[in-house]
Image (tube, helix red, strand yellow):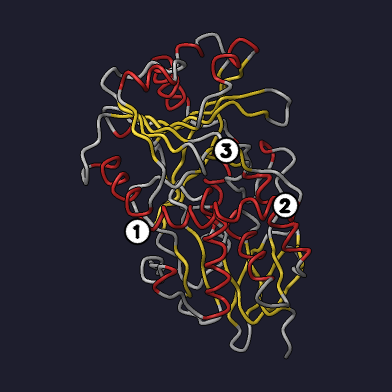
Amino acid sequence: MAADFKTIILGRGMMGAAAARHLAGMSDGIALIGPAEPADRKSHHGVFASHYDEARITRTFDDDVVWATLASRSLDRYAEIEAESGIRFYTEAGCLFAGPPAVRGEGYLGRALDVADEMRLPVKSLPPDELSRRFPQFAFNPIFHGYLENRRAGHINPRALVRAQALLAERGGVRLIDATATAVRDAGSHVEVTAGSVRYTAEKVLVAAGGFSNFNNLLPRPVDIRVSARTVAFYELGASEMEIFGGMPSTIVFGDREEDHVYILPPVRYPDGKAYLKLGGDTESRVFDTLAAASEWFRADGDKAEREHLAAIASTIMPGLKSSPITSAPCVATYTRDGYPYAGFTESPRIAVLTGGNFVAAKSSDEIGRLGAVLICDGGLGESDFGKELTPVFR
């Protein structure tokens, strides 16, 4: 029998939509299946996506050359995607790291400086006095140094980026299907995908469903990922706070303990018309193994204890926020065994998987999506595309 499509991509998030755009330039007969963002998060009982937000940090400065390369390749295409789609999603606000003085080759910052040298990144080191002078909105530890990536860094709007990718994919011939896939089956000569009340067939399927990849029978065998709860805090800013924080870069601050590390997004205007400064951390409060548990988390407002922990850190390093109302929201992080995304085929030569953002992949999603498209077309990834590092592990 003739299949409905050559390739079906499952998941209209950051990786899936990017894969669809790239694959449209390599092949025809493509469908991108996934639900739209729910109108009311708190009454929705299906799947969610973590890109339902207005800001994610983008940068190349990283302690791992694979992640730095994925980010750099994505950044290379931001302007092209914006120009072709007419949708703006990137703000070059710069990215600042603040922490104890780095020792080359040791710790995150020391390794990141080595990678920056290898990739010739324009990262400026700021001693404590210059750090405090340039960024007076922060009250950093007086021994902290700064590491500033001023160009090709800042933040992206993930909702807008996904819209741009999907628009260009559709313009390239991809069929967008607003539905949730509930089953995938290798039928021998083709793959069957059940979405809603409809069954579609394809020669190949790419599962790019993020933290929901192991739910709804999408894969022959579960991929080895850990789906972890994350809480983000939002500070609503008035005019006086905007005067203080309006010109800040995206910022990552190292604490005495790993759980005290925080990332901070500059003020961004949200759909309610208000400007919010967003702050998140690395604390893992729970792990999800079922769709019901993950959906319940997304309907909540995050973890109260984590919000208080973030607020305590914020009050120390950003005293200008003391009068700002604070709220919180849920997010999830999808971790893989080796800390890299998974991009490879399952035990079925017709079903591949693309997942595992490891809490840092939004900035790199366009390149990760491209690798998913190459995987489908070529059947694998070569050394220059980190095929070995991105090989999936299954349970």
Residue 88 sits in which quadrant? top right
Taking the spot 66% from the left edge, 36% from the top edge, the residue there is 42
Residue 38 sits in which quadrant? top right
Above or below residue 250? Residue 174 is: below
Q: Amino acid at mark 3?
A: Glu
Residue 130: horizontal and vertical position, in percent? 36, 21
Quick one: label 3, few (<14), some, or many (20+) residues within 10 Å?
A: some
Residue topped by disc 2: 83
Residue 266: horizontal and vertical position, in percent? 55, 28
Residue topped by disc 3: 92
Nearer-the-camera pick, 33 or 277: 277
Taking the spot 71% from the left edge, 52% from the top edge, the residue there is 164
- Left or right: residue 11 versus residue 288 is right
Quick one: label 2, few (<14), some, or many (20+) residues within 10 Å?
A: few
**SS assignment at label 1:** loop
Above or below residue 324? Residue 310 is: below
